[in-house]
Image (spheres, rainbow, N blue to C red):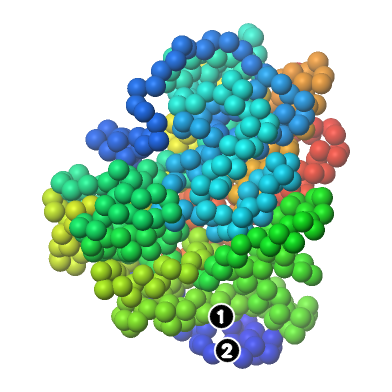
Amino acid sequence: MSESLTDTAQKAGMKLAFDPNALRDKYRTERDKRLRTDGNQQYVEIAGDFARFEDDPYVAPGFTRAPLTDEVDVVVIGGGFGGLLAGARLRQAGIKSIRMIEKGGDFGGTWYWNRYPGAACDIESYIYLPLLEEVNYIPKEKYSHGPEILAHSQAIARKFDLYDGACFQTEVTGMEWDEAISRWIISTNLGDRMKARYVAMSNGPLNKPKLPGIPGIETFKGHTFHTSRWDYAYTGGDSNGNLNKLGDKRVAIIGTGATAVQCVPHLGAAARHLYVFQRTPSSVDVRNNPRTDPEWANNLEPGWQQKRMNNFNILVTGGHQDEDLVNDGWTDLFRNLGSIVPTAGNEMSAGGRTNLMELADLQKMEQIRARAQAIVDDPATAEALKPYYRQFCKRPCMHEDYLPTFNRTNVTLVDTQGKGVQRITEKGIVVDGKEYEVDCIVFSTGFEVGTGYTHQSGYDLIGRDGVRLSQKWAEGLRTFHGMFSHGFPNCFFMGMTQTGFTPNLPHMLNEQSMHISYILKRAMGSNAGNIEASEEAESEWVGTIKRLAQLNQGFYEECTPGYYNNEGKPGDSGGFLTSAYGGGPEEFFAMWKSWREDGGMNGLHLS
Ligand code: NDP
């Protein structure tokens, strides 16, 4: 029989100020309230009548240019961190003929689109902003605000000459492999049919905004927009806040994820009245954002950024480090665990160690709940803002101003008890039969995750023998090492495709970029220009991913639904994390490193 949580706590000498079994039951009750059979189908695609929600507010409409039919060595699709890192690493490898293709009007990816008030990264900037040493830049604060990150993205592009030949406001509409000439033909919305020997695709894991499938959503007569296309013409102000046109407006925001946590304080400060419609509360910890100490920055040794990234990554994936360099809300849980484990000793069973992890998590979440209790004056509102799930079931948030916003007299939390908004009418929003009349609805409802790869990227690939990627991946991703797919030569997948995932996404993208640059340098330096995964290597990798995914499935099944666990269906393909390498990022990156050191390019055919 497996050991109970209380037995483990006793053995570890932990004094618990809570009943772990009662909390476990509470977590399950809260999860069950939110489980729904339609899972990912509950959302409305942004298309047709809703297409305007995706329009680019930062460029003038109607952009056009002459179509391109020329040829380059490497096309990189996506001008966010992934594309920028790929471009930079390829330049460092000596590759000159590179073309960046980006849907937006400039580089920046998620930071180009998400300019909502308060937008900031809550992963420490010194590990989150890529290539700091290469660009010779030190962020101004521990957690950078959006404009600084956008400017840094553009600085990377300038540093590595990625503006040269870049195609902005250009959406790829299709890619077809031409076997006769061993080139990809890339079609775009501007009529391009350009050729590329290699293509690296970094479309972004959270790039396509989504809307909630709330009955009546199309009937609302007031103003609406999605947070990733903030309408400053309507609200006034900018990403620093000062939303000076909202003084006479009743505003609703639907959704309380990481984005809402950052923009709600600004809406609350500006709107005549703000209604926050909540289905599940976020966990909101202390952020603490000191300005960068110049003395610390001056004393950094070469290689400091990678060292710091590794330190964070090892800690947040349960490994040991003597020092916690980042030392924040992300690493806190693991610090707690580290202080318990030495007392408990290594003689604990695997079940005992799993229990310890859960106990440390319960303790951490008790702290988060106590924080809501201490900050929010109204007891019912404070209770509604308490998250009852394990910390990494949803994206943890850190913010000083979110919870205090609910003490404002012009702010109302409308908690939907896990059910979500009931209905939208011409005039407002209905919950529990009560209509809240508003002038504007802000959709802070996140991004498409559960749909297929080609749906999210917005284009299909036609590989060798006319096989479409959408067909090949219809039952789930099929890759070798997350980066290649048999039948699609010279094509590199970046992002979340069966790869080593870390919460610090730029770390993962940097590893992918270095891997691509190694492989391309090898391929372009030899007579063998074509690279393709073998069918056997791919099957083996898909098997590995499936086998290791089972290690985490139990954890995600216990979680309240969200995009991390495929809206409560972690066993089905399509979740954000369900296709990640279950052995963790450190193991995955080490595997890639030894694969490169081996030099045999095992699993790939070069022809
Ligand atoms: P999320 O998908 O995290 O949140 C969507 C929100 O909408 C959830 O609160 C969800 O509730 C709610 N929702 C959906 N449908 C309904 C409905 N019918 N009625 C009421 N509420 C509904 O999107 P975000 O844009 O907040 O964040 C996306 C991701 O972007 C983050 O998880 C994070 O990875 C990243 N991000 C990172 C930041 C950073 O600091 N680096 C800052 C901001 C975002 P429920 O939870 O119940 O599903």
Numbered disc 1: secondary structure:
helix
Q: Is residue 121 visible?
A: yes
Numbered disc 2: secondary structure:
loop
Residue at 30%, 57% (x, y): give it. Answer: 253
Residue 443, image x and y in percent?
Answer: 32, 51
Q: Quadrant of residue 62?
A: top left
Q: Amino acid at mark 2?
A: Leu
10 Å crowding of disc 1: few (<14), some (14-19), many (20+): some
Q: Quadrant of residue 13?
A: bottom right
Residue 67, image x and y in percent?
Answer: 47, 12
10 Å crowding of disc 2: few (<14), some (14-19), many (20+): few
Q: Which mark is residue 209?
A: none
Question: Would you say 61 lies left or right of 469 here?
Answer: left
Q: Is residue 578 visible?
A: no
Residue 170, image x and y in percent?
Answer: 46, 24
Q: Earlier in the sequence, mark 1 or mark 2?
A: 2
The residue identified by callout 1 is 363
488 versus 557 height, above or below: above
The residue identified by callout 2 is 16
Is label 1 in contact with label 2 (beta carbons under 8 Å)? yes
Residue at 58%, 37% (x, y): give it. Answer: 154
Residue at 36%, 37% (x, y): give it. Answer: 57
Residue at 59%, 79% (x, y): give it. Answer: 359
412 versus 111 height, above or below: below
Separation of marks 1 and 2 at Cα, in angstroms:
8 Å
Q: Amino acid at mark 1?
A: Gln
